[in-house]
Image (tube, rainbow, N blue to C red):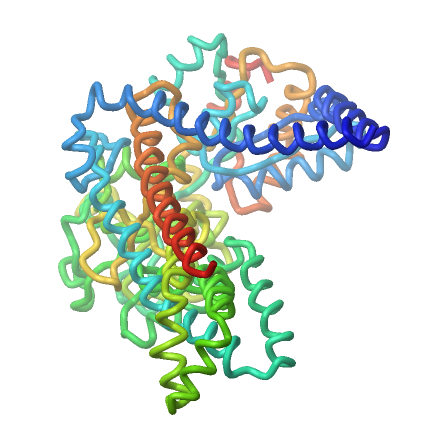
Amino acid sequence: MHNVKDKIIHGLFFLNGLIVMLVLLGIFVILCKAAIPAFQEISLKEFLTTARWDPTSLVKEGYGIGAMLLSTLMLTIGALIIAVPLGIGAAVYLTDIASPRFREIAKPVIEILAGIPSVVVGFLGIVLVGPIISKIFGISNGLNALNGSILLAIMALPTIISISEDALRSVPKTYHEASLALGATGWQTIIKVKIPAAVSGIIAACMLGMGRAIGETMTVLMATGCAPALPTSYLDPVRTMTATIAIELGEVAYDTTHYYALFGVGLVLFIITFVVNMLSDMVLRKYQKVRI
Amino acid sequence: MKKILSIFMSVAVLCFSFGPYAHAKMVQVKGSDTLINLVQKLSEVYMEKNPDKVISVTGGGSGTGIAALVNGKCSIANASRLIKTKEVDMAVSRGVDPKKVIVAVDGLCFLVNSSNVITQLTVDQLGKIFRGEITNWKEVGGDDKPISLYGRQSNSGTYDFVMEFLTKGDFSPKMRQMNGNAQIIEGVKADPTAIGYVGIAYVKGVEGIHVLEVSRAVGGKYFSPMNDADIKNGNYPLARPLYQYVDGMPAADVKDFIAFELSPEGQNIVKEEGFFEIPEEYIKNNKATVGI
């Protein structure tokens, strides 16, 4: 009886794993199938290298994803510039400096931050971050790339903090003790011993945070102003790939070039997040090997 | 083992049982964000009078509503623009026969921040501003400040209306594409250099903005949409009918609700919500198309 039960449960778990893989494969196939017809009418070069996206134009339709690709990259890089130092700093603080009691309170609070719905973060971008930015920089409106970067940084922080903390915590205690025994100060130990020892875990944490930032939709839709022009600075409004899909897919007529092109945008986004996740997975695996 | 089986069974039973009941007797209305508050109010009053009827009203933009009607996902599509030829073709190919009912009249308002000295513009100037040909307020007699544009996203009927009747070409790519009328108002309130457009029902009683008077041509008389008489007699150049589309001759449930909207009581609610009742010619028009 036990044996049968074992086998059934074994089979169920195998099935779960298989379903996840099939779903991923299915999404990829569907995206490709829906995106490929677009390139019968748009050249791949125009799609990837021009910046004018205006499929509902009265004059001439434009299908270039350059501006939104740049917007997505700007937001992601901006978010990482803000979130990475903050996240690593917080992780170091939690592992080495904070008292155990404070850590017990801080960790769940950080995890709650990860659970805030993106629409709420977007709302904060409109009513709080936007006005502050417009005041500081003396510009007329605070809905721009900087606003989006700050919000995405906030959303990526929990991932970066909690995975970096795990990585730092898994550095063997002996490293720490050896470093102190050799006369290094606490600061030197952290910077020169612990962080380098945990660096692959920290990199993986940042890349997972980046994956989150690239794919985020609602927040950037609400807080970045969504102007389709090619952005020239962080104080310009931007419209990301995710926002474009969210705005336009609801109204597009099926089986038109516009419809296929939106799937093309989705495919590009899928490939970017897939590569980022795969890289972070590879780095993570390397770091696990080092640990053992 | 029995436990697992029973869970599976109950999940399966739940899945099957939800299907048919979810749509029972519910009239789905979807579309224009200009119309959503009005139709929601109408449906509330209607449901109070007819407790056995259920009407669900959602937004998303005119394009979204019409796409839903074509795809058989709703029975009434709210629209602040006429259906496009492309959409009619799509509908016909799917066996849907879209018929138009005019439910209210709107005056499209252009608004600026209350600190702006400009109070009047011509239709031509508005077109140039939104095409991005006029980029500084001094070119239309205001202060020497760059104009920041606030508009809607391409799934909005108001976006299409402005594009067809005013800019007659593409919007400036620098226009911030906001996620609804309320966001445009918030943006214009906070931004001294802003200009934006929304339906009339959204500007009544709002502080911090003023609504521009518009004339058809240079030297012509300027009219304000805030003056009811000028909308009704057609003096204000940007008055427009608001529509609902249904599939063929509407079913009894749908017909009953539309009849309520067009009744004197329904039209009173239209006025209370800030729009204008439909004139005689539109009443005739509705009689001819759907017999109500």
Q: Quadrant of residue B84?
A: top left
The residue depicted at 42 percent of the width and 75 percent of the height is A89
List x then y, in percent, for residue B155.
39, 36
List x then y, in percent, for residue A21.
49, 31
Q: Is residue B241 something that shows in the picture?
A: no
List x then y, in percent, for residue A149.
35, 61
In the displayed structure image, the side of residue B85 where residue B140 appears, left or right: left
Residue B104 in the image: above or below residue B86: below
In the displayed structure image, the side of residue A78 where residue A281 appears, left or right: right
Q: Identify which residue, B200 or B11, lies in the foreground.
A: B11
Q: How many marks?
A: 0
List x then y, in percent, for residue B237.
32, 40
Quadrant position of the N terminus of chain A in the picture: top right
Q: Quadrant of residue A115?
A: bottom right
Q: Is residue B28 something that shows in the picture?
A: yes
Q: Identify which residue, A272 or B237, lies in the foreground.
A: A272
Residue B110 in the image: above or below residue B289: below
Furthest-right residue in view?
Answer: B2
The residue depicted at 42 percent of the width and 66 percent of the height is B208
Q: Quadrant of residue A50?
A: top left
